Amino acid sequence: MKLRAPSVPLITVDPYFSMWSPYDKLTDGSVEHWTGKPNSFNGTVFVDGKEYRFMGAGSAPAMAQMGLDIDALSTEYRFTGGGILLNVKFTALFLPNDLTVFTRPVGMIYVSWEALDGESHTVSVRITASEELCLDRANSDEVSVEMLSHNGITSAKMGSVSQPVLARCGDDVRIDWGYFYLSSDGGEAITFTDNLMTFVGICRDVPESGALFTAAYDDIESIVYFGDSLRSFWNRNGGSILSEIEATFRDREFLTSRCDIFAKKLWSDALICGGEKYAELLSLAYRQVCAAHKLVLDTEGNLLYISKECFSNGCAATVDVSYPSIPMFLIYNPELVEGMMRPIFRYARSEGWSFDFAPHDCGCYPHVNGQVYCDNRLEGQMPVEECGNMLVMAANVALAEGTAAFAEENLDLLEAWEKYLERYGRDPENQLCTDDFAGHLAHNCNLSIKAIMGIAALGIIYEMLDRKDEAGEKMGLAREMAADFCVRASNGDGSLRLAYDREGTFSMKYNAVWDKIWGTGFFDPRVISGELESYAGHTNVYGLPLDNRADYTKSDWLVWTATLLDDQADFEKAVAPLWLAYHESESRVPLTDWYDTKTAKMVGFRHRTVQGGLFIRMLHAGGKLWRRQ
């Protein structure tokens, strides 16, 4: 990968178990949780008895880092020192069509080496982890440590003494319950204290062919869902974390092969439709998007895919975070989009929701008990935004799965939300949209487009349910509203406004991408062409601003807007500034989606699921969704 990742994924499982290196070299500083708090995770290698450091901080001399390769599921470093070349490969098990493996909370670390000097060497590796991995912060609780031997595996287990399972919610917090496991198939488990922190570690000899280490986390219970404590999908039947660790060692070659095949296919598909820089962006985004969710089953056995609105406000199951993420999941497993939507349908039917539009979210992660965002006050809601989002998501699931059965189960709510769009979507009142950081805005043109596509979405669902007359009615209304939009939103110079009453303004018209993907053709192509041409005059070195109010942009909407371009060369030109922003940004964090187009610095947000939206060009190119003739 030519892209210099602003932060490099190492162990990525879920919003709590997520370790990154925000440095060009793995030895330049401590490994961090995605929030930026330390998750001290260190590695040293002994070559003929002499110690070298290859990961994290420490007093041993650092090996020379010779290379770094990142693909969708793996990060591989290469180091030299002591006459050997050391390879260290971190692999996540996010295989989307095998949900048991997909949710297995185990990260693989494969270490191998070869001699560079023609001499024979003895090599051993020590990997250690601090109490920071199982506490919100160091010394916030006492920890217990246990050394285990099970079916040929050596494990060091560590967890808090108090074990406050699912006791807290919030954004800038880390897990303080459950147990961390560091394992290898052989070697010695150790524990020690350093800098007033407890560490566990594994030391083992490593043959030239290599050895596997794993880092795993058993959170016991993962999500509170309307009063029920739910386990992760892998643990749905009360499985053992030790069995999952053992299965990883037993199937290491098969798992590695599957992960490599998946990553190569993702790269190839992205390269074909969007070019090399686009392929690199998707490869870096994939693990982040998966690791910002938790997959569980409700008490009736239905999938729930709960997002955390990372470094935004910690909301759980947020609709306008799910909506931009769906392109990735529509490609790889649309069942997971169903899992995003179920909590919203459940909450909307409850006594806790009093509005006639769709909720924004269902709680604060990991508590999915109902909205705490704005305390259910009307002024904090996003009525047109979330109604449109849920309808578009439902139609896309139906198209990706080839059946509208899931939408039919919730048709009463979808129909009610579509009626809301008919009443209020043509010229929205003063309210928030998904870009709520920009504040309230009346007559928002992007919200009108959202309403148009939401109404069309119900038309698609009706058509798939063989309700042709009703489908035609909704499609006709969407077409008429689109024509009206093109007239009222015009600046008179070929460009379109931010809001109907703000002449001379502009904004990305990212919501119109579904008109292209679905092939509905509601918007006059000459109008869209004029709008796209106008963006050249607003684009800065690091991309097109979201609108005329500020220099910041959103990565997801930038790629959605670029996907409106027919020519691939034009698309690559539009996406190149996003690649450059991550490549040069001083903000060394997991991919931010909200950054300044003049400085490339993060404005806010990091590690959010919305980066799944970068896959929208691939979704369109793959032809997975229905296109009207």
Image (cartoon, rainbow, N blue to C red):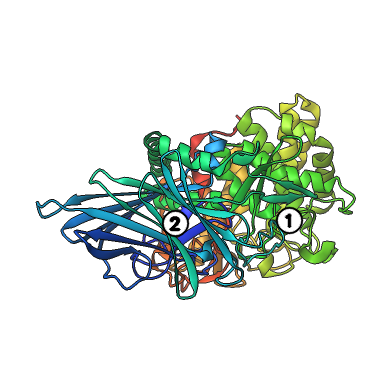
- Residue at mark 1: 367
Q: How crowded is mark 2: few (under 14 residues within 10 Å), some or many (20 or more)?
A: many
Hey, what amino acid is under mark 2? Pro
Dividing the picture into quadrants, the one containing residue 50 is: bottom left
The answer to whether 344 appears left or right of 311 in the picture is right
Pick whichever, 340 or 116, lies toward us. 116
**Residue 379's spot in the image, x, y percent?**
82, 66
Hey, what amino acid is under mark 1? His
Viewer can see residue 510: yes
Pick whichever, 553 or 97, lies toward us. 97
Q: Which residue lies furthest to the top in this view?
A: 466
**Residue 503's spot in the image, x, y percent?**
67, 68
The answer to whether 212 appears left or right of 151 in the picture is left
Q: Which of marks 1 and 2 is in front?
A: 1
Pick whichever, 369 or 346, lies toward us. 369
Dividing the picture into quadrants, the one containing residue 604 is: bottom right
Viewer can see residue 255: no
- In the image, what residue occupies the spot 41% across and 40% down? 152
Above or below, 14 against 26 in this view is above
- In the image, what residue occupies the spot 76% across and 31% down? 462
- Residue at mark 2: 9
Above or below, 542 against 271 in this view is below
Pick whichever, 574 or 53, lies toward us. 53
Above or below, 511 against 56 in this view is above
